[in-house]
Amino acid sequence: MDGLPSGLNSVVEPKARGRIVMSLHFHRAVEHMEIWSAIGDGFSFVITYESPAGSGFHGSAGYVASWRSLYRNDGAIKIGASAFATFTEAEEACNTTLEDLRGPAVG
C-alpha cells in the first residue's frame, strides 16, 4: 500500500476563488484500522483503504473517500467512481470536493 500518510500537516494554499483556504488535515481515526478523517467548514471527510481479502474494509483495492455534513443527518457521499490508487489522490479529491462545497467566494 503506497502513499500512506505520515503526519500530514495543514498547509495554507494560494488564494482560491478570492480567499485563502486551508487543506484538510487528515489523522488516523481508528488505531489498527486504515481509516483517516478530517473536518473542514462544517463537513466531515473520511478516507479508508479497501482490499478484496484480509481484515478491514472489503472492495476493490485502493483508497475510498467520502464526505458528509456535520450539521445535517445525511449519510456519507462517496467521492469518485472507484477507489483511488494512493492516499494522496484521495486526499486531493477531498480537498477539491471541499472547495466545490464552499461555493464561490463572496466579495
Image: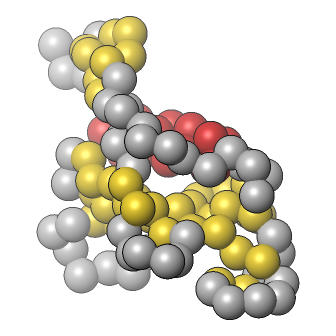
Q: Is residue 66 above or below residue 74?
A: above
Q: Is residue 15 visible?
A: yes
Q: Is residue 90 left or right of residue 69?
A: right
Q: Nearer the viewer, residue 46 or 69?
A: 46
Examine the rendered structure and indicate whether residue 71 appears above or below residue 39. Answer: below
> Relative to 19, is 11 above or below?
below
Residue 91 appears left or right of 15? right
Residue under the image location 26 percent in, 47 percent down: 40
Is residue 66 among what the camera can see? no
Quadrant position of residue 53: bottom right
- Between residue 84 and residue 19, name the one nearer to us: 84
Number of dots carrying numbers: 0
Relative to 38, does residue 20 appear above or below in the rendering? Answer: above
Q: Which image quarter holds the N terminus?
A: bottom right
Q: Residue at x 64, y 84 (%)?
A: 57
- The image shows residue 5 at horizontal and vertical percentages of 54, 46
Q: Would you identify the image quadrant in which residue 54 lies?
A: bottom right
* Relative image position of residue 27 (x, y in whole percent): 37, 54
Q: Position of residue 7 (x, y in %)?
A: 42, 42
Q: Residue at x 16, y 13 (%)?
A: 107
